[in-house]
Image (cartoon, helix red, strand yellow):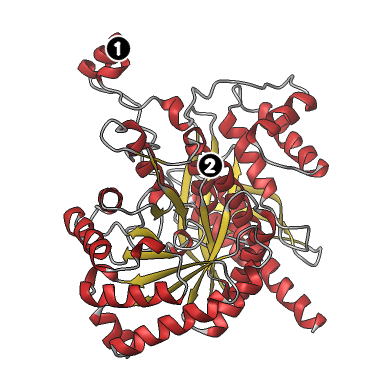
Amino acid sequence: MSRIKIFDTTLRDGEQSPGVNLNKLEKLEIAKQLERLGVDIMEAGFPASSEGDFNAVKLIADTIKDTSVTGLARTTKTDIDTAWEALKSAAEPRLHLFLATSPIHMTYKLKMSPEQVIEQSVNMVSYAKKKFPQIEWSAEDATRSDWNFLAQIIEKVIDAGATVINLPDTVGYTTPAEYGRMFHFIRETVPNIDKVSLSCHCHDDLGMAVANSISAVENGVTQVEGTINGIGERAGNAALEEVAVALKIRSDYYPYETGLKLNEIKRSSDLISKLTGMYVQANKAIIGRNAYAHESGIHQDGVLKNTETYEIITPELVGVSSNTLFLGKHSGKHAFKDKVKEFGIELTDEQVKEAFKQFKQLTDHKKEVTDDDIYTIIMEIKTEAAAVNKYQLETFQVHYGSADIPTATVSLETPEGESVQTACTGKGSVEALYNTLSNLIKEDLNLLDYQINSVGGGKDALAESHVQLSVNGEPTNGRGTAQDVIEASANAYLNAVNRYIIKQQSVKQKEVVK
């Protein structure tokens, strides 16, 4: 079996999904889970794009040691130098350089000739080689590039020191047969191609990202790039869990394997879904809620007699369990701490104390507490920023009836420690609540997106809300959970505002230090 390396770009390309805005702590938790999943390389971000991205990449590079950490950079010295400062403490510093090679990109975006693109790529790979032992060079929009030009530039960047060559389908344009032929052509045409690894990176605009990736593997690619849950710009990227499980289930046909711990797929998917607010569709392959559900009577009959009649993947393979009750209202702190350790998540004593407190509060209202419930509580606490002055919900009340005007009354503690109250109406209960909160908060607020979801099933399931707000013109995400959907909605709204405040306070502190 040939080993296929998995290059995960959830933290870079995945975070470019519209509406996704992760903070440093959330990115670190995702990175730790990707390390547990067993990805070979994780792209932690684009260090030169912002100070926040630089700090997140540096934190991940300083922390993660069992997975190679890389960062994206344009072919400029400043980008390369910035990436080095963020990544130099990594176990294996790695750089991902890119420059477009298609005629449409060179003409209209870069305004460079093909000769200039070659010169720029060669010079910057040579410059980066003085710092980085591993350099991946990507031909942006490779699938709409001239193959002979690709062969020419690839030969030269390999001579300059590139160790991985990536030919991405940047706009999701290609087909499996065409993509495979391109890699076959490059392998047959570039004389020094045996000195590097070949990588594929596929977008899903035409719904063929996974098929294109597997076609690339069939044609000599030894590294597949993608994201968990297939998140990413526009229609997203190749879903890595789909690639890995496809190679596993069809090992009779594909003589390839990955190093992924497949039973960590569900936990990875759940974490990324929770923190990004991008819920997994019910019918998604491998990890969707309905992936192992059977509605048809004929299917149910077959599965009861032999699961292999309609089930080619066992739920346990990817970490899907029955999610039965494991702790109740009489469970003690010791049992709770043991369960936290099972999740592989490190909590401080104070965080364990707070998580146990919230767990006990939940058991007062919820008869059956599941792994998903506990995991949600833990991640809410784990990714909460350090204590700062911020808005805190004291009390709220929403009056709603089919014949009445929805009205919300809210009492808040402001960042200055003052208690403020007011009441407002709306067309519905959530609008009334948000109108009231907006009235009490001095920032300029505009709701861009609102979602509500349940954690698990049953009428007593935890509610999980995600919002995107424009706070003083800056898009900010918020997340909140509670037994009640209205309270979860309030928590998410305040979380978004507080994330903005925390960010602003951090900027002010740095200005004072300077």
The disc labelled 1 sits on which kind of residue?
Asn
On the image, numbered disc 2 is attached to which residue?
Answer: 37
Tag 1 and tag 2, C-beta contact below 8 Å = no
* Number of numbered callouts drawn: 2
| Extreme-top residue of the structure | 305
Q: Where is residue 169 in the image (x, y as percent from the top left)?
A: 29, 64
Q: Where is residue 116 in the image (x, y as percent from the top left)?
A: 35, 89
Residue 49 in view (yes/no): no
On the image, numbered disc 1 is attached to which residue?
Answer: 306
> Could you tell me which residue is drawn at 66 percent across and 68 percent down?
88
Looking at the image, which is closer to me, 315 or 66? 66
Q: Quadrant of the C terminus?
A: bottom right
> Could you tell me which residue is drawn at 59 percent across and 56 percent down?
27
Relative to 149, 234 lies left or right? right
Q: Quadrant of residue 147?
A: bottom left
| Extreme-left residue of the structure | 177
The disc labelled 2 sits on which kind of residue?
Leu
